[in-house]
Image (spheres, rainbow, N blue to C red):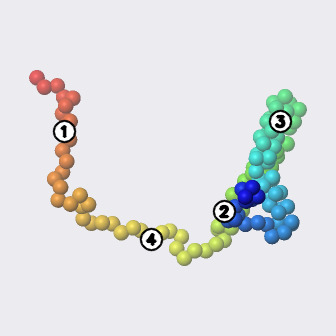
Amino acid sequence: MPGLLASTSLFVPRPVGPIEGALGWMTGTLLGTVATSACVLAVAFVGFQMLSGRLPVRRGLQVVVGCFLLLGAPVVAASISGLWTTSASPLPPPAAQASEDPRGDLPPAGDPYAGASLRRD
């Protein structure tokens, strides 16, 4: 039983081969916490260098754009591939409006506190 507890879930698909496993690891590394931390450190370092006058603004903007492309690549790719897919109807059909009152035959509710803040002389 100890081996059963240490195994992964049966519902998690395993990589087919070592190449796919390596690509999955690289993707996780390049788009995960390591990449985010590296981009934060790079922007902080470049910003400090720009403030001290040791780095031109153009080079600093190149670093920021590179970090944007690195971290935004999955979103950009998903949006581009979403533009190329065609669907039958881009918008869902409008919901049918109920014409009758859902409250039934109840009388309209009055406000029991209406006029409570008015001063009566």
Distance from the alpha carbon under mark 2 to that under mark 3:
31 Å
Distance from the alpha carbon under mark 1 to that under mark 3:
64 Å
| Label 4 residue SS | loop
The residue where tag 1 is placed is: 112
Distance from the alpha carbon under mark 1 to that under mark 4:
41 Å
User: In the shown orientation, is residue 9 left or right of residue 65?
Assistant: left
Distance from the alpha carbon under mark 1 to that under mark 2:
53 Å
Q: Who is closer to the viewer here, 25 or 114?
A: 25
Residue 79: mark: 2
Please, what is the three-letter code of the amino acid marked with disc 4?
A: Pro
The residue where tag 4 is placed is: 93
Q: Residue at x 61, y 74 (%)?
A: 86
Q: Who is closer to the viewer here, 35 or 120?
A: 35
* Residue 62 percent coordinates (x, y): 82, 46
Residue furthest to the top? 121
* Residue 41 placement: quadrant: top right
Whether residue 8 is visible, yes or no, is no
* Residue 64 percent coordinates (x, y): 78, 45
Q: Who is closer to the viewer here, 92 or 12?
A: 12
| Label 2 residue SS | helix
